Image: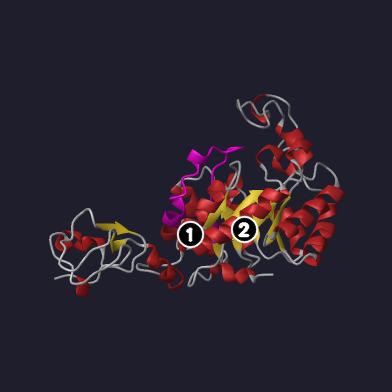
Amino acid sequence: MRNFKDIWNLSPRQVPWIVAEISGNHNGELERALELINAAAESGVDAIKLQTYKADIITLDIAENEFRVERAGSAWHGRTLHSLYSEAQTPWEWHGSMIQRAKELGIHWFSSPFDSTAVDFLEMFDPICYKIASPEIVDLPLISKCARTGRPMVISTGMATVAEIGEAVEAARGNGCEALILLKCTTDYPAPPGSSNLKTIPHMAKLFGCPCGLSDHTLGIGVAVAATAFGAVLIEKHLTLRRSDGGPDSAFSLEPQEFKALVLETRNAFEALGHVQYGPLETEKTSLKGRRSLYVTADMKAGEVFTEANVRSVRPSYGLGPKYLNIIIGRKVSQNVPAGTPISWDLVR
């Protein structure tokens, strides 16, 4: 288990933390929720994330107008907000069992509280940090409440303007949060890759002076892996056992084998960043012989002239470099040589 505090140690940079968002993919079954945590641990993630709310905390039980999802193309089109959150919520009485399972499996856990009562409830379980979901970034009292616990915070910035992010950061830091991560996020479900704008990650990190990562709702792992190259220190994706099982978030969630690939490929991407380097690596030096060089291509007797008919640039590289071809042509060979002889200066006169 990696030390969570290492995520703020940017010198040297760390391999991005991978967080599996459990969300509502438990489909109302505690055993499935526990199975999701098992799958997350087996995939090699650093942490799981829960969501701690009740439908009545987030919205009103009204079935018309703005309390219904009308956005065309939405995975939740036609649903009322209250019915959606009622289905997706993780019962508070499950938290103890889910947290214990994560501890048993040696992975971290944290949660997104959606009101002050959720913060008070989560405090009983000693979370490593609090996550503020994108829609809650404007809830400065909630951010302040989380910050006053003294715990690290992760804030998603989907839809937020620079000014709104600035207010959230000020609320967190002003109330005692000393360790803050901002996440680039696109609040579409699923989000098209072209809307990810990953170049924002290093810009946001510099602008607000804190590590930044990615909360990713795109399909697949390509965007998340690419975020590694832009300095993402934490990558969050939704996890489901099987998309075919349905559920409120299943359409844009990764299955366990895809999560395993995400963990592997982000590590590969991080290692691939390396450092600025020119010239052959130690491991490449034996491959230098695979370069071209000048060779005699037909038997020659001493005094014969080198021509394009008896000299050619071929592999391997034991002869003079190809750049000397025009200097060699027209000169005479100093001794008898068979075809296949690498040309060296002592053969030229």
Q: Looking at the image, which residue is at 73% across and 26% down?
A: 63
Instruction: Please identify, in this view, whether the residue under mark 1 or under mark 2 is nearer the observer.
Output: 2
- Under tag 1, what secondary structure? loop
Residue nearest the viewer, comparing 262 with 92: 262
334 left or right, relative to 276: left
Residue nearest the viewer, comparing 317 with 148: 317
Residue nearest the viewer, comparing 4 with 86: 4
Q: Position of residue 171 (x, y in %)?
A: 54, 58
Residue 142 visible to the viewer = no
Q: Looking at the figure, which quarter contains the C terminus?
A: bottom left
84 left or right, relative to 197: right
Q: Position of residue 30 (x, y in %)?
A: 85, 49
* 150 to 68, vertically: above or below: below
- Residue 102 — which label? none
The span shown in magenta is 181-204
* 92 to 210, vertically: above or below: above
19 magenta-colored: no
Q: Looking at the image, which residue is at 64% across and 49% down?
A: 237
- Kind of residue sitting beneath label 1: Gly
Q: Which residue is mark 1?
A: 231
- Residue 264 — which label? 2
